[in-house]
Amino acid sequence: MSCVDLKGKTILVTGAAGFIGSNLVKRLYSDVEDVTVIGIDNMNDYYDVRLKEARLKELSVHPSFVFVKGSIADKETIIEIFDKYKPQIVANLAAQAGVRYSITNPDAYVESNLIGFYNILEACRHSYDDGATGVEHLVYASSSSVYGSNKKVPYSTDDKVDNPVSLYAATKKSNELLAHAYSKLYNIPSTGLRFFTVYGPAGRPDMAYFGFTNKLVNGKTIKIFNYGNCKRDFTYIDDIVEGVVRVMQKAPDKVNGEDGLPLPPYAVYNIGNNNPENLLDFVQILSEELVRAGVLSEDYDFEAHKELVPMQLGDVPVTYADTSALERDFGFKPSTSLRDGLRKFAEWYKEFYMNENK
């Protein structure tokens, strides 16, 4: 692996107003000297735009942060960014997220996750034109959903992933295939990261922990799929960002094979907690932490607001990350407990939604 020094570099972060993207930008500014971050986000209303605006506001305190409101699916915008700022490292975190939404809104996924990623790859390819140094490392978000309903757990990056159960999963697998082809053809060092159920403060309202909280606060019933017989490898946002930053600094080597042609400088890793939690246990911990933070009253009747329902289309019963390759190559393993992570979420929720008018 080749070391990539982030100091003094220009880094493009797509999806910069998103959950993972905004936290990555914050971390880069806190840890890296003389860094310039170019952020792009289309600020769509897939979920509450106020959250995206609040994240951006936090980032705007950094004088060298440049924000471009636009879509990665717009080729001209991407070409312009690469021509003007010449990013040396790219973190592609822009995507249309959500498994269930992909079933009813397929167009959004093809546009962002396929066309958008293709535009990024093309821009990386042309960054080497005329002998320029170009992009040193492309790091991009894949997803645990590529494992589909694989029976073997924990999921390893050595496993076969040819049976996606949602369009979202299919687009993420396609990203890995496109990146491999471009790495092989144009020697672009690329690393894909399969994220497992990311959660935390200021996260995505379509994720279970956030959606459940909104419903409970409003006295509505929460639906627990597969009658609670689901397990998820919940991974706290700070652990995800730690993994991304470490990965950014080590790119796959550019080497030639026996035929004299480049071997693709390509890698894929899981970033997960390596500890799947039962959905019912998760709901129990969440409810305790919401009461502790003062989001819900101590006498809240949780049983009256829970409904056990069958599995949903596109869902899988378990996600479980084998993180041994990440530990081996980067000396890192996510370790935040679900209770600690949900406590931080509950405290943030109380502050953001319940104290905002006080």
Image (cartoon, helix red, strand yellow):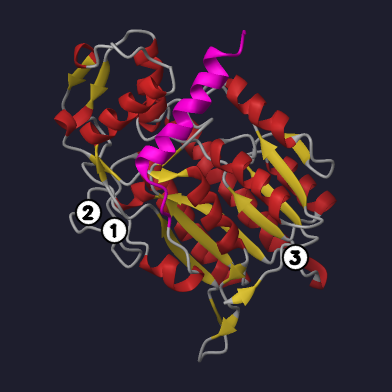
The answer to whether one can see residue 345 in this image is yes
Q: Look at the image and say whether residue 348 sits in the magenta stretch.
A: yes
Residue identified by numbered label 2: 150
The amino acid marked with disc number 3 is Gly
- Tell me which amino acid carries mark 2: Asn
Q: CA distance from mark 3 to mark 2?
A: 38 Å
Q: CA distance from mark 2 to mark 1?
A: 8 Å
Quarter holding residue 217: top left
Expressed as whole percent of the image width and height from the top left, the position of residue 275 reads: 29, 51
Residue 134 tag number: 3
Which tag, 3 or 2, sits closer to the chain's start? 3
> Along the polypeptide, which appears first: circle 1 or circle 3?
3
Please provide the residue range marked out in magenta: 334-358
Tell me the element at label 3.
Answer: loop
**Labelled pair 2, 1 in contact (Cβ < 8 Å):** yes
| Residue 333, image quadrant | bottom left
Q: Is residue 178 left or right of residue 155?
A: right
Secondary structure character of the magenta stretch overall: helix
Q: How far apart in space, not on screen, are marks 1 and 3 (Cα)?
A: 34 Å
Residue under numbered circle 1: 155
Q: Are marks 1 and 3 in contact (CB under 8 Å)?
A: no
Q: Position of residue 27 (x, y in %)?
A: 65, 48
Q: Nearer the viewer, residue 182 or 306?
A: 306
- Mark 1, Cα crowd under 10 Å, few <14 / some 14-19 / many 20+, is many
Q: Position of residue 350 (x, y in %)?
A: 50, 20
Quarter of the rendering occupied by the C terminus? top right
Q: Nearer the viewer, mark 1 or mark 3?
A: 1
The stretch drawn in magenta includes residue 23: no
Whole-percent x, y for residue 297 in the image: 36, 12
Give the amino acid at mark 1.
Answer: Tyr
Q: For the point 59% across and 70% down, which residue is it? A: 251
